[in-house]
Amino acid sequence: MPKVTKIDRSFTCFPVKKRVAAYARVSVDSDELMHSLAAQVSHYSAHIQANPSWEYAGVYADAGISGTGTGKRAEFQRLMQDCRKGLVDIILTKSISRFARNTVDLLNTVRKLRELGISVRFERENLDSLSPDGELMLSILASYAQEESLSISENVKWGIRKRFEQGEFPAYNIYGYHWTGERFEIIKEEAEAVRFMYRSFADGRMLIEISEELARRGVPNRKGKPFGKTSILRILDQEKYRGFSILQRTYVEDHITHRKRMNHGRLPRFVVEGTHPRIISDTLHEMVEAERERRRKAGAVKWRVASCFTGKLVCGNCGSSFTYTPGTSTNKGDLTEYQQGQYRCSNKRNNSIKACSAKNLPLRVLRQACCSSLGPLFGVSEEAEFDPAWIDGQVKQIVVFADTLEFHLHDERIVRAPWKSTARRDAWEFRRQKMARMQESEEKQ
């Protein structure tokens, strides 16, 4: 019979204190709720430090942040980072709705913390996430919290729309005006800058020219930075400079994502006249709109040459159509393939790169292939300029393969032309030229 010897413990295990943190949040930044947040911080600090078996690990508090998402809660993210670093063993929080109103976010977060051995204790629900039935109860209660959030969101939207119907509108911060607390007043210098933008655009000046002229005059935006093209375009779109407001131009699509959408008729819009003094006359606004229409038509004519290929390019790999993607510039001249634009397989564009392995076909390469393959058929040299009439009148379909283009003509003939993209080489050349111009400019200065 084997001999067994028992070895007794030679040391004593002392209990290790649990590192305990707390998380608090209020969704509205008001004096009353900020007082509530301060009370929560004070309560948890005293509660944790009063327990001799706990070690105080701090209180993390977010103010004025919605609980439907975790991405914008800086303190919540800092708490999660400290958990991953092993600085926290237990998290105390008032309720599930304070921790997260989004069921998916809540369960994902709790599961990640469970893998780290970290417990989340919800006081109101008397629930511990590490308990055997913790996740089941959490999913049920979190669903109630999410529905409560939806109900609050719908009630707030209803109240806003009722105020819109009565002509009430929120005090917004708009360039050119100052809100006194009761009405809007025009800021003379800003109003003059707005008029300059409208007059310059109506006179035919490009957005970049307007931006550069404002910078030269020392007219910045309210952040102290130069006006960009997008900012100028927004000002040209703003109806408030004509003395009225359009309410509910946008709406929040979902109370979880808080993503805004333009209101194109899904919800009623309200036009409120006389909300503030006007800066722009109707005549000047009409001149701007007329110039916009002129530029739109001019832009369509400028790219008309690409429209002769519309509906005729077919992917030889998957059979889908090729669609056009404009480049970074609409100026004519010796542009790179990336700047001129290219055709892409719609299957690859709409799904993923795995859906189709077809290469993108640059517009310039397509034109060159047309000149080299179709030019001789019409009695012109390969060096002749591209003529859209060749495609409009003679070509029924163009099948795009990896290194070959097949031109299917109306007379049943098939003409093949090799092609190869030089987009990568042109991109490097474009960067090299840009760096050279920057260096030359620095040397002159």
Image (cartoon, rainbow, N blue to C red):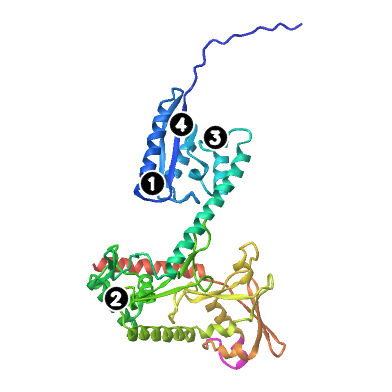
Q: Position of residue 401 (x, y in %)?
A: 65, 73
Q: Are marks 4 and 3 in contact (CB under 8 Å)?
A: no
Task: Tell me the residue at 56%/88% (across/down).
Answer: 388
Residue on which disc 4 sits: 20
User: Which comes before the other along the chain, label 2 or label 3?
Assistant: 3
| Viewport quadrant of the C terminus | bottom left
Closer to the camera in the image, 397 or 3: 3
Type of the residue with mark 2: Pro
Q: Is residue 381 magenta?
A: yes
Q: Which residue is mark 3?
A: 126
Q: Amino acid at mark 4?
A: Val
List the residue tagged with mark 1.
33
Q: Amino acid at mark 1?
A: Leu
Q: CA distance from mark 1 to mark 3?
A: 24 Å
* Type of secondary structure dominating the magenta stretch: loop
| 198 versus 21 height, above or below | below
Q: Which segment is the magenta one? A: 374-383
The disc label shown at residue 409, or none: none
Q: Residues within 10 Å of mark 4 (few under 14, many from 20)?
A: many
N-term-proximal mark, 4 vs 2: 4
- Residue displayed at 33% across by 84% down: 284
Which residue bears the numbered disc 2? 277
Q: Earlier in the sequence, mark 1 or mark 4?
A: 4
